[in-house]
Amino acid sequence: MNTIRIAGMLGVMLAATPALAQDDTGIKAGDVLLRARAIVVTPNERSGDILPAFPGERVSISDSVMPEVDITWMATDNIGFELIASTTKHKADGRTGTTGSIGELASTWVLPPTLTAQYHFNPRGTVRPYVGAGVNYTIFWDEKASTGLTGAVGPTKVHMKDSFGWAAQAGIDIDLSKKFFLNLDVKYIDIDTTARLDTTAAGRQSVKLNIDPLVFGIGFGVRL
């Protein structure tokens, strides 16, 4: 009888082992995911005219490559909330005419904290696609006129208005182990601003910008 009971217990344990291993795969409610990515920010800018002195002249915004950190809290097995933190530096260049001949007009750092609600497909799998949507508040800081601009119109102060907009994302997590995973991610961030240039020789000039970047990221994550 003892041998039969021991054999029965071993059978139950062996049957339970795959289930326990499966429970430890992927993500579940309550998990916290920390990711570190390298990102490429590529603006899809639409520029208004530089007014009032340079009608018809517009600006372009440069790309930027930077590190990014984000954290996701899983409210359920499928639904998570992600907050990203990164800041990138961009240049505003003239395209044509007088400002085009100057080239770089100004530079600014951009901080766009973004919160998204995500839906994670296949949460218990080792390959987990997700989509998300949310909001962002973009802060422009350390705005500076270029040496080319100050050489042309004298000392210049630059101010860019902060922006509130929406965001969308899609990505995929691929497990490398029980805790660590590879991440690929792309976001669209709605950023609209007005840049104001207070110049010595040309007075106040302003230009409306829809920056609206795509943010491509690749990195690694850990399930805390």
Image (cartoon, helix red, strand yellow):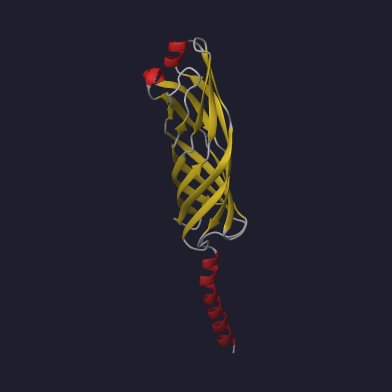
- Residue drawn at (48%, 63%), measured in percent from left and top? 125
Left or right: 137, with 45 as reference point: right
The x and y percentages for residue 181 are 47, 53
- 185 over 212 or under it: above or below: below
Report the residue at 55% width, 66% height from top: 23
Please, which residue is most extreme toward the bottom here?
Answer: 1
Percent across and percent down for residue 224 are: 57, 51
Figure quadrant of the N terminus: bottom right
Between 102 and 90, the one nearer to me in the picture: 102
* Nearer to me, 34 or 61: 61
Q: Quadrant of residue 94?
A: top left
**Residue at 52% across, 10% down:** 200
Q: Is residue 100 above or below residue 89?
A: above
**In this view, 72 is above or below 7:** above
> In the picture provided, is 13 more to the left or to the right than 91?
right
Where's residue 150, x and y in %? 46, 13
Coordinates of residue 36 in the picture (x, y in percent): 49, 43
Q: Is 170 placed above or below 16 here?
A: above
Total marks drawn?
A: 0
Q: Nearer the viewer, residue 220 or 45?
A: 45
For image coordinates 50% across by 31% down, the residue present is 209
**Viewed as shown, does residue 89 lie left or right of 30?**
left
